[in-house]
Image (spheres, helix red, strand yellow):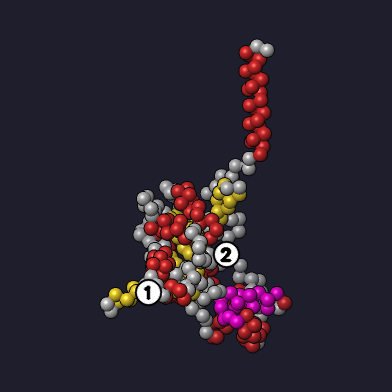
Amino acid sequence: MSDASRLERLLHLAETALARLDAALPPAPPPTDWQGAVAFRWKKRDGRGWLQAVARPHPIRLADLGNVDDQKARIVANTRQFVAGKPANNVLLTGSRGSGKSSLVKAVLNEYSGKGLRLIEVDKDDLVDLPDIVERLDGRPERFIVFCDDLSFEAGETAYKALKSVLDGSVAAPPDNVLIYATSNRRHLMPETFAENLETNRVGDEIHPGETTEEKVSLSERFGLWISFYPFSQDDYLGIVRHWLHHFGVAEATIAGCERDALNWALQRGSRSGRVAWQFARDLAGHAKPTRKKAR
């Protein structure tokens, strides 16, 4: 066999091997549809990540959120500054479950998406990819909220280190067009244990927390704006129930007579929250005869 024939055979074998390798590799992630969506999710498959457009973002509006006027005003002011290109803070929303923390972030997106605001939802398990996500957003004309919902870290988890790096910057400064908005039931995001109290030291008349406590506090302190949510009173809860029943077009007579059922619904769930009020309203609206079309 001539040298030319051997070379041709080797090239053929190489092309065959490359074709088999290409077939075995996962497909390339789709390009990001920046113009076709206002909300995205960070998705991963076979070690590759991409931004997946959300076809139907939650339609909740700021007007739908009652009894959180102070919290609403603070996050709206911060987001307005951010959209306008002015300095703004990363935000940590903490407190009672179902009190409107994540709904408020979604409502802010709906309020300012027309002015260039975009939202990217990142699961806690994917926080290690935050530096890569932020790098993709740097330099784009839009303003991005990276949204981490129901955020908390258990003992031994290390993903919070990537979050700390993005919040405060590492060697590179964080980009001006990205903020982190996170919700959590824990003010310091990480569990507190009795053993941590034993690390406390007394220096003269001052009490100094141990290193474990300091590390937890240092994470939450990287959020410039803390917004706290509290359990609703009975009257607040019933007011939210009425709001959603009106939204679903339930008859006034039915709304006037549902107070006892609404309170029993909350009692069964052990919570008077906006989420529980919305769930009750959906249930009642599902079997009540509407008198008009829904507001949306």
Disc 1 and disc 2: Cα gap in Å? 47 Å
Q: Vertically, is 211 above or below 172?
A: below
Report which residue position mark 1 lands on: 200
Which of marks 2 and 1 precedes in the sequence? Answer: 2
Place of residue 203 in the rendered image (x, y in percent of width and height, measured from the top left): 29, 75
Query: Is residue 71 shown to the viewer in this render?
Result: no
Q: Which quadrant: the C terminus?
A: bottom right
In the picture, measured across the screen, residue 294 lies left or right of residue 104, that is: right
Q: How would you classify the magenta stretch by its main secondary structure?
A: helix
Place of residue 290 in the rendered image (x, y in percent of width and height, measured from the top left): 69, 76
Count of numbered tags: 2
Q: Residue at coordinates 57% horizontally, 83% vertically from top-left? A: 238
Q: Vertically, is 264 above or below 156?
A: below
In the picture, measured across the screen, residue 33 lies left or right of residue 79, that is: right
Query: Is residue 136 shown to the viewer in this render?
Result: yes
| Residue 285 within the segment the image draws in magenta | yes
Q: Residue at coordinates 44% horizontally, 70% vertically from top-left? A: 188
Place of residue 284 in the rendered image (x, y in percent of width and height, measured from the top left): 68, 78
- What amino acid is found at the position of numbered circle 1 in the picture? Thr
Q: Residue at coordinates 52% horizontally, 84% vertically from top-left? A: 233
Place of residue 27 in the rendered image (x, y in percent of width and height, measured from the top left): 63, 42
**Label at residue 59:** 2
The magenta span reads: 270-286
Residue 64 lies in quadrant: bottom right
